[in-house]
């Protein structure tokens, strides 16, 4: 079986500035016709419009049933690529082929008309997305139920709240039954519970074996949904591989993996009570380290200055993995400072994360300083304070054992196993 | 597997390809969307209006009365033996459809930029739907014309059956001009500013408030180059039981055909760049 999507030497050039920019008007045409000869006389050369390559020589294939994520900075060409695949705009060079019925979702709520009711808009946007009326009718109740706005279904959507609007729009889109689905950032909307619902729906779509090409800025969504990720940078394809690897390198380049960070007075997180001064990742010996052996303890050290005495303070560390999963939150509960107000001065606290606990990959540390008595107050907050990498070396005595492939799970404890054995046939 | 693959839909997009090259097959495949877009345009047009679709009747009727008072009674324009109200209404019927169809469809693409930049379908459906949305109004207005003809006991005869064909010709002409302007306006926004007075002039070049016979022979050609002339005169003739002027009709049909071909050609030329221009 051939690929579901084939992109061949694809390039798209846009003009910025110059004659063809924006809307040509008759007046401009006349003006240019009048002025150009004189410009030539004066020795000016005609300035060609500046061009920018939104895509340059992009080349890849997607096999049927694959879920591929497309990531990159704004302006990397992700949306242009989807627009060409969806046949909304033509490439300057190269070609794309999509095998099978294609659905494209570049924006949810496409084709919704504010004056029409929810019910009418479901049918209309179904038609626009290529779903037949009979099919929409068949799945109508399902769509409405998914959206959770049954009681407003006969109200014009202009009176909907933006949340209701998005729910309805995604519900329609989620029920598209096409073999190939191309979607752009549709998950970046709605509240958390609705986003979860969308993710679940995407899982469901994926499990049906449909091919999905999916643009997102949400790395957790990408790593959770896609096996494979393509990284675009300034219109070029710079990476294509297993989701974790590509996302990893993208995030690494993005955040400049730093195991230590110091803040000067102007930028130190904190308030009049306490200021954070430094955060770093350290090993047992006290050296700053960017990578930690999965088997050994690794410490996160926070230095902070108490400016106002009389507050009970606790340093706190939140750990996220590269997929954006919140692994744990921990604050200092040792008896020393649990109830005792801290005098002014400089403090250094270290939290030790045990060995054989984290999974391998990049870890992002959020550091903060809080009070829990008398009330919970967040005094200082440093998201993305420092990062480090947990490395599981081959042939070590880690939980990996003799297995060499990728190991799933956000933690990788080395657990005790017991086995009872008796010789002979089973009883 | 191979045969299975051959049956699959393939969407190809490549440089130089005329996107959605005008194919009736594709329009047919998207007929449901055409129906929905038309239905949407009709529905939205009369939403939140107290009188709803009654506006479709009021507009031409009101114009008919205004014309009858000013041109008929005050100025005394000859109506070739036709009752004045029928005379004006017969001219206003195709004109109202044509003018509003052209205005609606010429702006339709620009007004649908959110669709054009977000989803693929044959773009020509948008101006077609905008024109088609006027069909309900045309039908109601035609029934009123028929009612007027019966009221005045006109000696229509079988020739009246030509009127629906003339209205069909009007629809094609409206489609042609509307589709053509819709595509051009995406590129040259100036046209929308010129459109109102171009239509105004066009109306005076159409024998709506006067019969062709009052035009000096020297200037007749100017009136006859206008494809609506043959249509308006034809409708009047058919209502009076006369055969329509064949020559004028042939001119109308030929010009409408040429306009349609130019429209489709222009549309295909510009269509590729819609999403980048709009």
Image: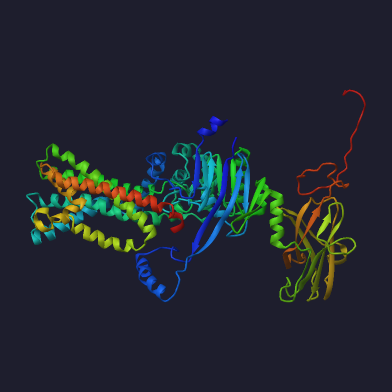
Depth order, front residue of A278/B12:
B12
Q: Where is residue A361 in the image (x, y as percent from the top left)?
A: 76, 53
Q: For this view, does A349 lie left or right of residue B135?
A: right
The quadrant of the rendering that contains the C terminus of chain A is top right
Residue A338 visible to the viewer:
yes
Q: Is residue A265 left or right of residue A113?
A: right
Number of on-image labels: 0
Reply above or below: A212 against A253. above
Question: x, y (%) of residue A376?
Answer: 74, 64
Q: Work out whether B209 lies above or below A268.
A: above
Q: Which of A76 and A59 is in front in this view?
A: A59
A374 displayed left or right of A175: right
Residue B181 in the image: x percent, y percent? Answer: 33, 55
Nearer to us in this view, A62 or B165? A62
Instruction: Report whether residue B207 is seen.
Output: no
B75 with respect to A388 (left or right): left
Colouring method of the image: rainbow
Outermost residue toward the left in this view: B81
Residue A54, percent from left and from top: 55, 58
Q: Quadrant of residue A332?
A: bottom right
Quadrant assignment for the N terminus of chain A: top right
């Amino acid at each position: 079986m051939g690929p579901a999507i084939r992109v061949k030497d694809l390039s798209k050039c846009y003009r910025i500035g110059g004659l063809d920019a924006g809307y040509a008007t008759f007046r401009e045409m006349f003006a240019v016709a009048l002025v150009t000869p004189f410009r030539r006389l004066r020795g000016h050369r005609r300035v060609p419009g500046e061009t920018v390559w939104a895509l340059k020589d992009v080349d890849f294939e997607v096999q049927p049933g694959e879920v591929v994520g497309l990531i990159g900075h704004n302006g990397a060409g992700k949306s242009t690529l989807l627009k060409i695949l969806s046949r909304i705009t033509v490439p300057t060079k190269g070609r794309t082929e999509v095998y099978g019925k294609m659905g494209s979702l570049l924006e949810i709520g496409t084709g919704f008309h504010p004056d029409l009711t929810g019910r009418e808009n479901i049918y209309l946007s179904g038609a626009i997305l290529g779903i037949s009326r009979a099919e929409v009718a068949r799945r109508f109740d399902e769509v409405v139920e998914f959206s959770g706005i049954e009681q407003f279904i006969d109200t014009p959507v202009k009176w909907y709240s933006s949340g209701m609007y998005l729910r309805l729009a995604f519900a329609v889109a989620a029920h598209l039954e096409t073999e190939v689905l191309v979607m752009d950032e549709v998950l970046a909307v709605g509240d958390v519970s609705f986003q979860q619902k969308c993710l679940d729906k995407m899982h469901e779509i994926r499990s049906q074996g449909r091919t999905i090409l999916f643009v997102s800025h949400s790395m957790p969504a990408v790593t959770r949904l896609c096996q494979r990720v393509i990284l675009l940078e300034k219109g070029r394809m710079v990476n294509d591989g297993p989701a974790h690897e590509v996302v990893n390198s993208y995030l690494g380049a993005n955040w400049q993996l730093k195991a230590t960070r110091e803040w000067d007075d102007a930028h130190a997180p904190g308030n009049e009570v306490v200021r954070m001064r430094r955060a770093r990742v350290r090993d047992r010996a006290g050296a700053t380290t960017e990578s930690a052996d999965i088997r050994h303890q690794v410490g996160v050290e926070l230095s902070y200055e108490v400016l106002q005495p009389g507050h009970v303070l606790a340093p706190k560390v939140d750990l996220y993995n590269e997929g954006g999963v919140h692994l744990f939150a921990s604050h200092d509960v040792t008896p020393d400072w649990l109830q005792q107000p801290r005098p002014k001065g400089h403090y250094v606290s270290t939290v030790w994360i045990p060995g054989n606990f984290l999974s391998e990959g990049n870890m992002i540390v959020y550091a903060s300083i809080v009070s829990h008595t008398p009330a919970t107050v967040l005094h200082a907050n440093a998201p993305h304070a420092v990062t480090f990498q947990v490395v599981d070396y081959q042939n070590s005595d880690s939980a990996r054992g003799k297995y060499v492939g990728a190991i799933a799970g956000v933690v990788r404890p080395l657990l005790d196993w017991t086995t009872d054995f008796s010789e002979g046939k089973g009883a | 597997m191979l045969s299975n693959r051959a049956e699959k839909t393939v969407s190809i997009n490549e440089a130089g390809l005329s996107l959605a090259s005008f194919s009736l097959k594709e329009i047919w495949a998207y007929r449901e969307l055409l129906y929905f877009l038309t239905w949407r345009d009709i529905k939205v047009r009369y939403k939140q209006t107290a009188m709803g679709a009654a506006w479709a009747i009021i507009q031409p009727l009101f114009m008919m009365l205004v014309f009858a008072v000013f041109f008929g009674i005050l100025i005394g324009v000859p109506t070739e033996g036709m009752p004045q109200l029928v005379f004006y209404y017969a001219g206003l019927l195709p004109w109202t459809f044509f003018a509003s169809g052209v205005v609606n469809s010429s702006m339709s693409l620009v007004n649908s930029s959110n669709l054009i930049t977000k989803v693929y379908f044959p773009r020509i459906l948008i101006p077609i739907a905008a024109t088609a949305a006027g069909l309900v109004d045309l039908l109601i207005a035609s029934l009123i014309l028929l009612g007027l003809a019966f009221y005045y006991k006109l000696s229509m005869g079988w020739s009246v059956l030509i009127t629906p064909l003339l209205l069909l010709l009007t629809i094609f002409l409206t489609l042609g001009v509307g589709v053509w302007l819709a595509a051009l306006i995406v590129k040259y926004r100036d046209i929308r500013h010129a459109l109102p007075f171009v239509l105004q002039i066009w109306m005076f070049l159409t024998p709506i408030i006067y019969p062709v016979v009052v035009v000096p022979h020297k200037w007749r050609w100017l009136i006859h180059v206008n494809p609506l002339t043959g249509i308006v005169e034809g409708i009047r003739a058919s209502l009076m039981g006369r055969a329509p002027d064949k020559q004028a009709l042939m001119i109308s049909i030929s010009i409408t055909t040429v306009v349609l071909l130019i429209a489709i050609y222009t549309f295909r030329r510009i269509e590729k760049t819609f999403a980048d221009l709009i």
